[in-house]
Amino acid sequence: MIRSEAKTWLAVPAISINRRVALPVAVVVFALLTAVAGQVAVPLGVTPVPMTLQTLFVLLAGVLLGPVAGASSQLLYLALGVAGAPVFAMGGAGLPWIFGPTGGYLMAFPMAAALTGWIAGRDGKVLRTTAGFVAGTVVIFALGAAWLSAVTDLGAGALFAASVQPFLPGAVAKVAIGVVAARLVLSRMVRKRETKA
């Protein structure tokens, strides 16, 4: 009886600590995943902005962590880059990188993660999750194009060709992959909650 009570008493702080630690750790993990994905970069030649895997993890952060924690992971990512860590695409770092051609895309990451998480919710439903991913992608394209226009003075047609068009096939693929991945993870989380209930 005493041994059983001791086990129960010891288990309570462990559960409490895990809950307190899990979300901040997940925020750090998604910041690092975004950084690693930035190193998987392909220069396209037709635009000063390389194609990377970053947006997949930006949007997944919003869906899996929720809007606040998802945005926090991307703010942490940006803070690391501004502080000098080589986390931006192809090892870029420092504040000047934010003011370069890719700055609009980078600055859109926290907002995109928050919007994606807010729209998608946490139930893993396909339509909501897809809508969240699409909305987040639109935000990244919109701010990326607006900033690129400000730093390059490209006309509308050339701006679209440089800031959106080359990335559309990749964006569609990342939305599809992200929705499937998010649904798998969230449906497992829902099942766990139902089992505990």
Image: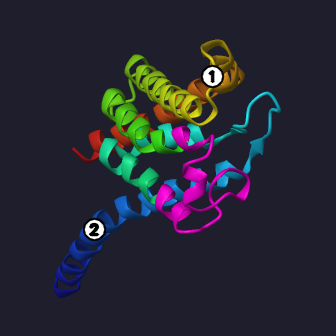
> How dense is the environment of label 2, judged by Cα within 10 Å: few (below 14), some, or many (20 and up)?
few
x then y, percent, for residue 196? 26, 48
**Quadrant hosting residue 145:** top right
**Which amino acid, by three-letter code, is at mark 2?**
Ile
**Quadrant hosting residue 141:** top right
Q: Determine whether 25 is above or below 135 in the image.
A: below
Instruction: Evaluate if marks 1 and 2 touch, with contact meaning CB atoms under 8 Å apart.
Output: no
The magenta segment: 77-105
Nearer to us of marks 1 and 2 is 1
x then y, percent, for residue 178? 55, 32
Residue bearing the label numbered 1: 164
For marks 1 and 2, give the CA distance. Answer: 46 Å
> How dense is the environment of label 1, judged by Cα within 10 Å: few (below 14), some, or many (20 and up)?
some
**Which amino acid, by three-letter code, is at mark 1?**
Val
x then y, percent, for residue 99? 55, 48
Residue bearing the label numbered 2: 15
Q: Determine whether 139 is above or below 22 in the image.
A: above
Q: Please check the rendered image and state whether residue 104 is part of the magenta-colored stretch, yes or no.
A: yes
x then y, percent, for residue 44? 80, 32
Helix, strand or loop at label 1? It is loop
The one of 84 and 14 positioned closer to us in this rendering: 84
From the viewer's perspective, is 150 left or right of 17?
right
Residue lying at 41% horizontally and 34% vertically, measured from the top left? 187
Q: Determine whether 129 is above or below 70 in the image.
A: above
Q: Please check the rendered image and state whether residue 195 is part of the magenta-colored stretch, yes or no.
A: no
